[in-house]
Amino acid sequence: MPPSRHLSPLLIASLLAASPALSPAATVQKGHAATHAGFKLDPVPTPAIDDAARMATFTLIDGERDRNSGELAVLADGKVPAGEDAPRENFFFAMNTAGGRIGVDLGKVLSVKSIGSYSWHAGGRGPQVYDLYAADGTAKDFNPAPKKGTDPATVGWKRVAKVDTRFKEGNGGGQHGVEISNPDGQPLGEIRHLLFDVAKTDDADPHGNTFFSEIDVIDAKAATPQRLKTPERIVKSYKSKDGGFRYIIDSTKAPALTEWTEKELLPVIEEWYPKLVEMLPSDGYRAPDVVNFEFRDDMGGTPAYAAGNRIALSATWFPGQLGREAKGCVVHEMGHVVQNYWRARQTNRQPSPTPGWVTEGICDYIRWFLYEPESKGAVIRDARQAKYDASYRVTANFLDWLTTAKDKDLVRKLNAAAREGRYDEKLWNEWTGKTVQELGEEWRKAIEDGKR
Ligand SMILES: [Zn+2]
C-alpha cells in the first residue's frame, strides 16, 4: 500500500474497496532438503494432490517457457518429478531470460488458507525467488495480466509475500518447499487471482531459472486436501570396529530386507571391505572410507552395480537370493569400489584402458576363490570353456591358477597396474616370462589334464 496521508479521503476509500480483504502479515515457511526427500520438507507440508489449484487456469502472463520445460499444467497436476533433473515434469522459464509472470485464476473467489510452491533441481535451479500478488478481481482498474514493468499493486493487486529460498552459501540444489499462510491460522484472504512474479535465482547463470514442480492453493472452506505420502526412509550408518570406515545402507526401497541386511549382510561387509582394501593396495592409494549401499527398484534385470563409492542393489533380485548369491554379489561390488579404476584418468594423463575381463575377473576371483571357495562357483569342468578373457568366473579361475602356479602376488600387481592406468599385455611377460596367450593355454591344459 502506498502511504495514504497525502491522499484524499475519497481516494483512500476507493483504494480500500479495490484491495481484496487480505491480511497484511502472511508468513513464508521454507523447507529444504539437499537430496531426494520425497518433498518432506519440514515445516512445509508435502504437496497437496486435490487442492484448489487443480481446477484453476494457469496463464503465462509474461516471459517465455523453456523449450525443454513441461507445460504450465504440471504445476497443478498433484504430481512431483521423479528425479532431480526432470525438465518435462517441471515448469521453468527459458534459458537466457530473467523469469516471468504466471497467473492463476481460481474461477471464483475463494477463502484461501494457504499457498504452497515446490521446486527441485540438483543445482542452482532449485531455489525459488518470487513475489506473490493476489486479487479478488473486483477493482475497477483491475488488470488480470500485467506484464513485467507494470507494478501489479497499481492495477488492482496486492502483494501477499516475498519469497526467496536461496542460501548465502552453495548453489541451493535440492528440493525446496514454501508455504504462505497466516500465523494465526486465519485465511490469507478472499482471493480469485494469483500472480507469481518470478525472478531468476542467479543473474549470472543463463540457466538460473527455477524448476517449479507444483503449486498448491488450499481452500479454507473445502475438505482438508490429500497430501503426497512420503515413505519413511530407512537409512542406517555403521562405523567399522576400528573406526576407519563407514557403511551407509539405505533399504527404503526394500524394507523387508532391513533386518537381513543388518544381521546377515553387515557382518560380511564389515569383514570383507577392509580385507579388500588390504588385498588391493597400490602406491599412495587410499580406498574410499565411506561406502553407500542402496536398494533400488529401478534397475531392470541388473542385480547390482558399483559407481564410485556407491553400490546399488536390486530390491527385486535380492529377496530371491538371500541364501544363495546375495552376499557374494555384494563382495564382488565392494571389489569395484576398492579397485576404483575410474580414477586412472585423474592420476594418469594418458591412461591405458583396463579390459573389462580384468576388472570383472579380479572381483570374481576374490568372490569365488577367497570369499566363498566352498561354493565352487567358478570351477571349470569343460576345458573348452577355459578362455582366459571370458571374464567373470572363467577369468577368476585363470587368476586363481596364476596365483597358485605362477605368482602369489599376481592379482595385487594386476590391480595396481589397472588402477594407475598402465595395463599392458607386456606386463604378463614381465611378471611370468610368458604372454597372456601362453599362460591361457597352459592353464587350459592343466584343466584338461585334470590338474585343477
Ligand atoms: Zn562387476
Image: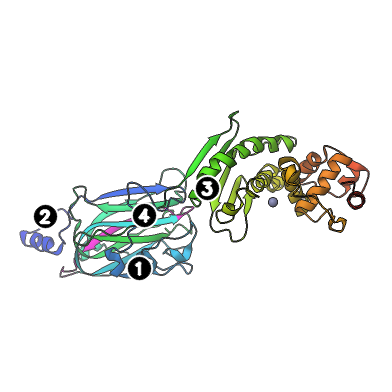
Which amino acid type is marked by label 4?
A: Val
* Label 2 element class: loop
User: Residue 267 placed where, x, y %?
Assistant: 60, 37
Which amino acid type is marked by label 1?
A: Asp
User: Residue 204 placed where, x, y %?
Assistant: 47, 54
Q: Nearer the viewer, residue 439 or 264?
A: 264
Residue at 91%, 42% in the rendered image: 432
| Nearest to N terminus: mark 4 or mark 2 | 2
Q: Which residue is mark 3?
A: 257
Q: Is 59 situated left or right of 435 in this image? A: left
Magenta residues, start to end: 121-141
Which amino acid type is marked by label 3?
A: Leu
In three-dimensional space, the C-alpha distance between marks 4 and 1, rounded to whole angstroms, equals: 16 Å
**Callout 1: few (<14), some (14-19), or many (20+) C-alpha neighbours within 10 Å?**
some
Q: Which residue is mark 2?
A: 6
Which amino acid type is marked by label 2?
A: His
Most distant residue in the top direction: 242
Q: Which residue is mark 1?
A: 62
**Callout 4: few (<14), some (14-19), or many (20+) C-alpha neighbours within 10 Å?**
many
**Mark 3 lies within 8 Å of ligand 1 (Cβ measured):** no
Q: Which residue is mark 4?
A: 129
* Magenta region includes residue 233: no
In three-dimensional space, the C-alpha distance between marks 3 and 2, rounded to whole angstroms, equals: 71 Å
* Magenta region includes residue 129: yes
Q: Given contact means CB atoms under 8 Å apart, are the residues at marks 3 and 2 in contact?
A: no
